[in-house]
Amino acid sequence: MSYPEPKYLGETGEVSAVFRAADHPAELLFASGGSAGYLATGASTGGQFGLYQWNMAPGRSGPDPHFHKSISESFYILSGTVRLYNGTTWIDAERGDFLYVPEGGVHGFRNESGEAASMLLLFAPGAPREGYFEGLATLGELSEEERRAFFEYHDTYWVDE
């Protein structure tokens, strides 16, 4: 494996770094008390990746097993206990644990610990996941056909455990 072709062709470098302070408020607040911080969206990284901090309140939350056709997804646990599904079994993941799921890989996550939990979600390439996250709040208002179209548009395909 080698490095990809250069995207920057200059000789001196440029000032282009983006800083986000730890106290920056989350972009999305959930009725459950959880939140999502948009650390680096696909739009802000030129489509290379999307990085999100997913904060779950106590109580069961998170998606059942599913897969994506066009994006990989990675999970890094920051705090608490998150149940991660690796396609065959649910694993109680704790601070420092990591799960990588390539395109087509069945996965899911849940907070069933009764305590708050936080993790980083990394999508590559950087798909527009913000619309998916924001649309979750109104899923109950959609017809079955609209819900199916929503998930297909956002590259989410559900499977049985």
Image (cartoon, rainbow, N blue to C red):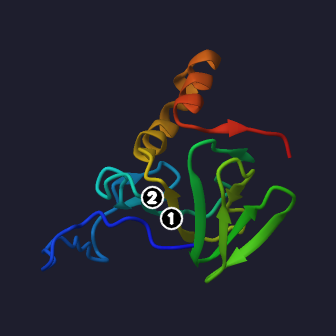
Q: Is residue 133 left or right of residue 40?
A: right
Residue drawn at x 12%, y 80% is: 12
Residue drawn at x 75%, y 47% is: 65
User: Between 143 and 104, which is closer to the camera in this rendering?
Assistant: 104
Tag 2: amino acid = Ser
Residue drawn at x 53%, y 23% is: 141
- Residue 73, given in percent of the width and then of the height, sits at 59, 58
SS label for mark 2 = strand
Residue at mark 1: 55
Q: Are marks 1 and 2 in contact (CB under 8 Å)?
A: yes
Label 2 crowd (10 A; few <14 / some 14-19 / many >=20): some
Quadrant of residue 19 in the image? bottom left
Residue at mark 2: 35
Q: Is residue 24 left or right of residue 2?
A: left
User: Between 60 and 51, which is closer to the camera in this rendering?
Assistant: 51
Placement of 8 over or under 134, stated as above or below: below
